[in-house]
Amino acid sequence: MQESTSRRPTLSAAGKLNVAGMVTAAAGIIIQIASGSDLYPTIPPGPIILLAGAALVALGPWRWTPIVGVVVPLFLTVGAVIAAVNSGEFIDQLTNPGQVAIGIFAGDVIQMLGVITALVAGIVALRQSSRTRTGDRHELRG
């Protein structure tokens, strides 16, 4: 009897941490918005991009999904740095927590921890994924 080849590969620990980091970063942005931060547009793209990336990494059966786990947090990190350099408001929120609502400061910290975790775990997951053999049906996926 032949085994089914449609079985989705198992997500590695680094892949799970990558997904958790992206979801955490999205939660941090939502906390900032709910606390009154005006850094984001009416429909903020950050949480949408992070949650879509997390869903792709967690549920996508394709071999390229670990790349998404690196590109998405890297994209958000670069965007945050550009925004911080242009306005300086994000840096002010992090360096002067007494000047902003506690929710905004907490959301900033949560977002940064989530993005850093997602980026590091995504790199590890991508490296693990690239080392697996292509013929192994039970391979770990990013």
Image (cartoon, rainbow, N blue to C red):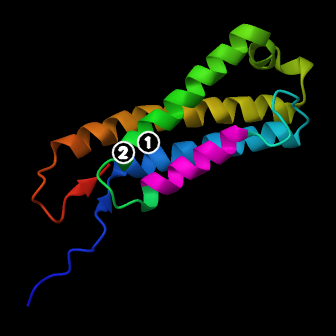
Judge from the rendering whether residue 42 lies leftward or rightward of residue 50; answer left or right. right
Q: Residue furthest bottom?
A: 1
Vertical comparison of 86 with 141: above or below: above
**Residue 19: x, y in percent?**
49, 49
Residue visible at 76% across and 33% down? 106
Vertical comparison of 40 with 22: above or below: above
Residue nearer the viewer, 83 or 18: 83
Residue visible at 18% across and 65% down? 138
At mark 1, the secondary structure is helix
* Disc 1 packing (10 Å; few <14; some 14–19; many ≥20): many
At mark 2, the secondary structure is helix
Residue visible at 27% across and 73% down? 7
Judge from the rendering whether residue 55 lies leftward or rightward of residue 40; answer left or right. left
Residue nearer the viewer, 140 or 113: 140
Vertical comparison of 27 with 2: above or below: above
Judge from the rendering whether residue 23 lies leftward or rightward of residue 27; answer left or right. left
The amino acid on which the numbered mark 1 sits, given as a three-letter code, is Gly
Residue visible at 26% across and 37% down? 127
**Residue 60: x, y in percent?**
40, 59
**Extent of the magenta region:** 45-57
State how far apart marks 2 and 1 are (Cα): 5 Å
Can residue 52 be found in the magenta stretch?
Answer: yes
* Residue marked by disc 1: 69
* Disc 2 packing (10 Å; few <14; some 14–19; many ≥20): many
Vertical comparison of 131 with 123: above or below: below
Q: Does the residue at mark 2 contact the one at mark 1 (Cβ under 8 Å)? A: yes
**Quarter of the figure with residue 3:** bottom left
Q: Which mark is residue 66?
A: 2
Residue nearer the viewer, 130 or 128: 130
The amino acid on which the numbered mark 2 sits, given as a three-letter code, is Pro
